[in-house]
Image (cartoon, grey):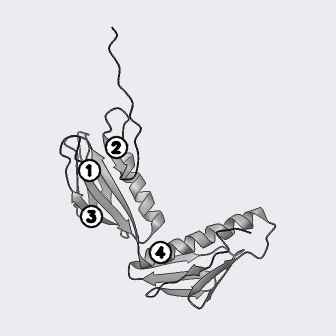
Amino acid sequence: MSRIGKKPIAVPGGVKVEQKGRHFKISGPKGTLELDTHPEIEVNVEDNKIIVSNPDQEDRRKKALHGTVRALLNNMVIGASKGFSKPMQIFGTGYNVKEQGGKLVLNVGYCHPVELKVPKSVNVEIKTPATRGNDVPALFTLSGPNKQELGQFAAEVRKVRPPEPYQGKGIRYTDEHVIRKVGKALGA
């Protein structure tokens, strides 16, 4: 039995769970999320708890789906109540970030600014719009109720200019550690 799948999901106050067959709609202060669960996994809502169960404990695929469905529903409950956020940094002299007309505009050393369309469920909060030297990074936070959409957009932003190992320039997550390399040394 899946250790994660057998844990019940507590539904906090202010979050409403609607079930129509396999379709779940979870709404809360941060937003509304919907999911169609897998037909081989049973999901029930009882006294402010979501209980996910697996009728066939021997099938490996169903055991994997048991934990996955529970994790997806748990992420929906957390997203609807608290939301998720990804703080990010940009290192590099002259690099900056701004939001313009539903697009995230990044100036990160290319001859042109890179524009990325921000998904509707993702909010962008810019704390420091431009870098100051190589020491003070530009800071911005991506937030939203949908963990998958938020993570996908954050990965696309990071992919514009991934951090390079020699000078550390580029876009990175705030909690990401970039292993730095030593440059070429002059021979004696």
Where residue 47 appears, as percent x and y from the top left, is 59, 91
Mark 3 Cα shell of 10 Å, populated few (<14), some (14-19), many (≥20): some
Which labelled disc corresponds to residue 161?
2
- Distance in Å between CA atoms under marks 4 and 1: 30 Å
Q: For the residues labelled 4 and 1, say whether their Cβ atoms are less than 8 Å apart.
A: no
Q: Which residue is depicted at the point 62% across and 79% down?
A: 8
Q: Which residue is depicted at the point 70% across and 68% down?
A: 2
- Distance in Å between CA atoms under marks 2 and 4: 30 Å
Label 4: which secondary element: helix
Q: Which tag is nearer the camera, tag 4 or tag 3?
A: 4
Q: Is residue 55 above or below residue 130?
A: below
Q: Which residue is depicted at the point 27% across and 64% down?
A: 125
Q: For the residues labelled 4 and 3, say whether their Cβ atoms are less than 8 Å apart.
A: no
Screen quadrant of the N terminus: bottom right
Q: Which tag is nearer the camera, tag 2 or tag 3?
A: 3
In front of the other: 114 or 157: 157
Q: Is residue 92 above or below residue 188?
A: below
Q: Earlier in the sequence, mark 2 or mark 4?
A: 4
Label 1: which secondary element: strand
Q: Earlier in the sequence, mark 4 or mark 3?
A: 4
Disc 3: which residue: 125
Q: Which tag is nearer the camera, tag 3 or tag 1?
A: 3
Disc 4: which residue: 78
Disc 1: which residue: 106
- Distance in Å between CA atoms under marks 1 and 2: 9 Å
Q: Amino acid at mark 3?
A: Glu
Q: For the residues labelled 1 and 2, say whether their Cβ atoms are less than 8 Å apart.
A: yes
Could one spot residue 118 in this view of the protein? no
Q: Earlier in the sequence, mark 2 or mark 3?
A: 3
